[in-house]
Image (cartoon, helix red, strand yellow):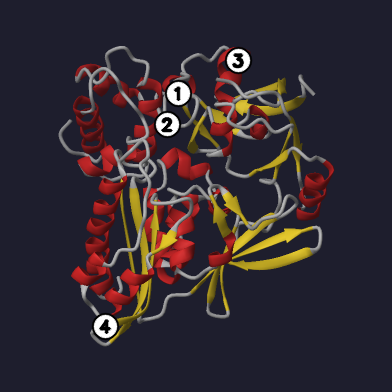
Amino acid sequence: MKPAPFAYKRARALEEAVAALGEHADARLLAGGQSLIATLNMRLSAPRLLIDINGIGGLDGIALKAGKLEIGALTRHAQAERSEVIARHAPLIARAIPHIGHAAIRNRGTLGGSIAFADPAAELPACLLALDGEVDATGPKGKRTIKAADFFKGLFETALGPQDVLTAIRVPAATKDTRVGFAELARRHGDYAIVGLAASARADGKSFADVRLAFFGVGATALRAKKAETALASGNVDAAVAALDLDPQDDLQATAAVKKHLAGVLLRRVAKQLMEARP
Amino acid sequence: MSHFALDISLTVNGERVSERVEARKMLVDFLREDLGLTGSHVGCEHGVCGACTVRVNGEIVRGCLMLAVQCDGATVETIEGLSDSGELADLQLAFEQRNALQCGYCTPGMLTAAQDLLKRGGVPSRDAIREHLSGNYCRCTGYHAIVDAVEAVAQARAGGKP
């Protein structure tokens, strides 16, 4: 189908985008558009105005700042995929990105857009949660920082206000003790996952500390499996699988029982990755 | 509002184009309807099938997930341009020789995506070829002949046997 008619405005500065969001109640920001435009085409959404933020400078940087890696919201997936800085300092994100859509989608889609869209089956929100990352947003009252755990509120729902523009994400830079793992099961490469898992941990001798398991495709947002995290910290994979505290719902792709089973399969795969030395 | 339109100027297959387009018009519809370049096809219209794959500023994109107005100032290449320049000639011949197309609906997108992989150089593995073409659906031949054709061209370009 074709989208319902809308007006289009190019924002050249962040303040301009924030102001435009304030002037039009039914406006949406257009970044990579790889999710938004699909919803427009299917008429699942019909905003009156699109505010194109692609022309705003300074929102696509990748930089190490005080032990954290900051990635600008307009960084394209393809740009992140090629980034040696991300590969070294945020290896979990580097592992996840090839699973996002296809080459042509990754050329346009942005990291900020994926986080702001908050699809429950998407890879990057789970990575942000697993890494205990944070999000920068600028609104009418200026800039604020929101922790990942407080950011994803519900199905496609975030802590962003109606006039907020997500400007960057930030994750702790990996150290020599950082271990990460990522796996997902999808019907075809590039599809949204039936179930996926993004994980991080700190190697502590033979066991782990700070294990964070963020499952996606199993609820309204990416979800941590905290009982399994505790079990895995002691190095017991079987106990971690048995302790998986997830309560997925049936969806078009799989039943709840299948999803729960697959979550255990992924946990075993990811536990193996975590036990490997850092790549 | 219902006919919100903007003036855009861009380069399409080497030619300067200036048109007034409705904001909601997708790049692929602009190419087909306004410029008569009907080689780019419209399939699913939500980024899944890859029939609308075109090049914008040297990178492949979904023509159904990019607004024409976003291409103001851009350089766009479609299958017509890629075909006329001869850039794809060996790939087109390999598709024909190996029956890597039947109805042909997916073929422009398939060729454009395959060339995107091949122009990086080297001989990609069959898995890498499949992965790169995973966003392009073929509903006739299946994918074996397509992967065969792309692999053969990669080998030939790298100096191996065709």
Asked which secondary structure carries label 2, the reply is loop
Asked which secondary structure carries label 1, the reply is loop
- Distance, label 4 to label 1, CA atoms, is 48 Å
Task: Name the residue tied to disc 3.
Answer: B35
> At 74% from the left edge and 65% from the top edge, which residue is drawn?
A143
Label 2: few (<14), some or many (≥20) within 10 Å? many
Q: Is residue A247 left or right of residue A14?
A: left
Q: Nearer the viewer, residue A85 or A263?
A: A263
Q: Chain of mark 3?
A: B
Task: Name the residue tied to disc 4.
Answer: A207
Task: Name the residue tied to disc 2.
Answer: B48
- Is the same chain shared between marks 4 and 3? no
Amino acid type at image mark 4: Ser
The quarter holding residue B57 reads: top right
Residue B71 in picture, x, y percent from top left: 64, 32
User: Which callout, 2 or 4, points to the residue nearer the camera?
Assistant: 4
The quarter holding residue B69 reads: top right
Residue A62 seen by the camera: no
Label 4: few (<14), some or many (≥20) within 10 Å? some
- Is the same chain shared between marks 2 and 4? no
Q: Quadrant of the C terminus of chain A?
A: bottom left
